[in-house]
Amino acid sequence: MSKDITSREADYSQWYIDIVRKAGLADYSAVKGCMVIKPYGFGIWEHMRDQLDKMFKQTGHVNAYFPLLIPKSFLSKEAAHVEGFAKECAVVTHYRLKNAPDGSGVIVDPEAKLEEELIIRPTSETIIWDSYRDWIQSYRDLPVLINQWANVLRWEMRTRLFLRTAEFLWQEGHTAHETREEAIAEAERMLDVYARFAEEWMALPVVRGVKTANERFAGAEETYCIEALMQDGWALQAGTSHFLGQNFAKAFDVQFSTRNNSREYVWATSWGVSTRLMGALIMAHSDDEGLVVPPRIAPTQVVIIPVPKSLPALQETIDTIASDLQSLGIRVKVDSNDQDRPGFKFAEYEKIGIPIRLAIGARDLEAGTIEVARRDTREKQSVPLAGLSTHIQALLEEIQQNLYNRALQFRTEHTTRVDTWEQFVDVLENKGGFISAHWDGTPETEQQIKEETKATIRCIPLDAPTEAGQCVRTGKPSTKRVLFARAY
Amino acid sequence: MSKDITSREADYSQWYIDIVRKAGLADYSAVKGCMVIKPYGFGIWEHMRDQLDKMFKQTGHVNAYFPLLIPKSFLSKEAAHVEGFAKECAVVTHYRLKNAPDGSGVIVDPEAKLEEELIIRPTSETIIWDSYRDWIQSYRDLPVLINQWANVLRWEMRTRLFLRTAEFLWQEGHTAHETREEAIAEAERMLDVYARFAEEWMALPVVRGVKTANERFAGAEETYCIEALMQDGWALQAGTSHFLGQNFAKAFDVQFSTRNNSREYVWATSWGVSTRLMGALIMAHSDDEGLVVPPRIAPTQVVIIPVPKSLPALQETIDTIASDLQSLGIRVKVDSNDQDRPGFKFAEYEKIGIPIRLAIGARDLEAGTIEVARRDTREKQSVPLAGLSTHIQALLEEIQQNLYNRALQFRTEHTTRVDTWEQFVDVLENKGGFISAHWDGTPETEQQIKEETKATIRCIPLDAPTEAGQCVRTGKPSTKRVLFARAY
């Protein structure tokens, strides 16, 4: 076990924080609730972002950029939206500082007060739909398929690195459509993109579902989501895609001329994932030695270390291995730094989760072999140098698949069908994970269960079969099971 | 001449705004001074950003992300910095809104007042050096070579799309070094990266120089810059790289243990370019027909249009051409939309500056040729279909080079050596461009010339030879010519 990192069993929350900080992913800053994303953490985020961006473009989307600041009055234009977002906003009231008369520093210049306060965007529906009014006149201007990569800010009292911070990075798609059906299809298409990204790139199995009315995005008619399960049995919402109906078009008066020459309000979606995914990544795969990163999003996939320290005789072989791997598109680092012992390096690279470590010494060279250590299982194996690069390429795929399988198995083992309230409470307290149970469909029961147990309905799975049953809490009739869990 | 676009001769400022808006690059938003970067404009910015990011990584830099908000007191820690940046800040004073008692909307909750106001970053030296204090203990932690892509905000009263907006996008490099020499070398290296990017990718010739004390970045010991010349004879600062000495290390108490076990303050640089480059791009190359984009940063390099409208018989040939071009890495769009006439399409693609337009009709197909129109010279040529893709590949390079040569020739013709004040005023009023003249080296003379003529010293060119002369304004002795111009 790593000396730097608290074990999961001893203190799961501390384990998480230790990984984030000791693996150099992020840290707190001087501003309460705002984090610094450190280079290694940002490197992983870049790989995630670039892959998502590619998938957005493949599905016909383009990027644009809208203002950081939103006039206060915009928030009030959509009734549900203001309830959801007005409460936790950073408010800009002034636009100038001046020197304090007593020479003690700078103070806010009272004469530079804004006529209307501005809000730092907590999400951009309002400012974007204000632009769409000018952009959309006719059905020929539709669909509008725009995404934005941006920082957003929601004032949070209790923060946790990546999982809940005041400022975070995300992407937000905002699309405009001719018909209800087309908008719903778009919301579902983007949920599918998120699910494929989570499963194929982050090795993170997810449940696709819709939110209950209580948990819906403020201003949406339907919120689709992907839900993942963490190693402590808590759920994490990994992405959402909203069908917004005509709510924002009505709030911002965005109408278009239809093919029949009538006027209609535009149909909308929005969808987003954020740096919160970094938290999901950490909690899904990592162990007591440190971070575990799936190969496809690892900034460095293979590290090569000469043993002992640096050995000039090995340099040529190491260079050849590195360039062979690079020519297969594998991201390689050679660590010939001779200040640190190999054992120290091994622990450091385990801590930051490099998928494969290669170590080679004089004896290996003589035998024509190399030591291959995989991070996921921590197994070591001596492998012939001949054919090494194709072996490594296959092993990276195997690790990717193994991480997914392991997480899927964990989720399967931690998804429990429950039919009585007693069992519900017992599973929640003693086992955790997803609870598949009947619910009577009312917000009141959902709220009651939340207050009693802190478990919420994570989603109504899209693939949930129709099945007669009785609500686990009230005994009233139900036609479908939903997924409950305690959640981040 | 395009009907949509005012000619440069008639009204240069209006011409610029027309191009920005009619080519779909950007637009104003509901928030004063903040722009919306539209998809096509953002697409060009993405190509610029990605190439710069690649060059930063090739020179050993990594990306990270620091908070948007900065405690007000941080600005005061570096004496020159506060003077430069405190005056134009957006100030966050509250963190919550609430419903107005009269039901009229939302108001700022007076109870949610921050103890210390927060500033939206106008630049990030202060918040970053506050982190570096924790990150840097020893010479072994150096150098730190970090870049950040971010939005920043400087309150501006008079704004112009891309050139001067309250919020803009940029990158800011912030590096930390063991020695003065290493930091200076870094600042110079990054100036070189900027100059190569401007010349090789934006086809924009630039003068490399240093700023006078008056024009230096607030907190820098030396500001390096690249200066470009626009078609109206005004200069535009396209990028800056600052040697910050130990100023920020002292302000934030960032010391390290040296190789000799002493303690020393860390040496720093910072460097940045912004979406302002989009303004430079437009004003350097575009004409009265619309935007002209250098091929290397054009989101679409070649557009293929069937004439008339869409002709089913042509589809196969067009598909083959497109896939041949794509296989050479060329970015191609086929416009078979049959709602618009070819002539209309031609004008639209000229307006948005696609470097090469291919048009093909039945007669071309019979003759085995295609019409190739280049955007830079607006020349058309009939070219054999056989060997077309290699012809296009070479032509894209030729266009890139031609744009650079044209801009360089313009700059050469508009750089005037001047030795008398009379001549200085005459050239400034009647010809514009760079004026190469002697200056006595005092801030007072510089200020006087600025007040009298609105011309500023753009830079002291790095390659300016030592040459005895007399200040153009005061007649006092001088050893070097500097470059004056009116500037954006």
Image (cartoon, coloured by chain):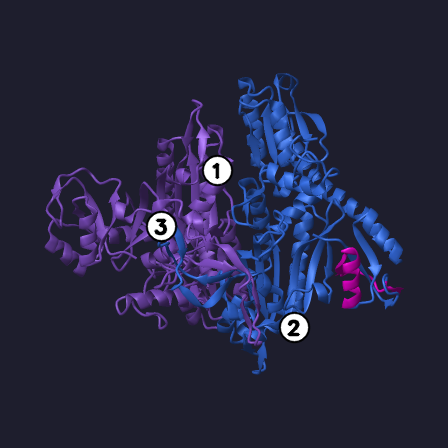
Chain colours: A blue, B purple
Which residue does the numbered mark 2 point to in the structure image? Answer: A180
Q: Nearer the viewer, residue A452 or B360?
A: A452
Which residue does the numbered mark 3 point to in the structure image? Answer: A103
Which residue does the numbered mark 1 point to in the structure image? Answer: B133
Residue shown at the point (13%, 46%) measured from the top left: B471
Q: The N terminus of chain B appears in which quarter of the rendering?
A: bottom left
- Disc 1 and disc 2: Cα gap in Å? 54 Å
Residue shown at the point (36%, 68%) measured from the top left: B18
- Disc 3 and disc 2: Cα gap in Å? 61 Å
Where is residue B404 drawn, in percent x and y? 32, 51
Give amino acid for label 3. Answer: Gly
Residue range of the region highlighted in magenta in the rendering: A443-471
Where is residue A476 drawn, in percent x and y? 87, 68
Give amino acid for label 1. Answer: Arg
* Disc 3 secondary structure class: loop
Q: Nearer the viewer, residue B393 or B12?
A: B12
Residue shown at the point (26%, 57%) measured from the top left: B234
| Residue B28's disc number | none
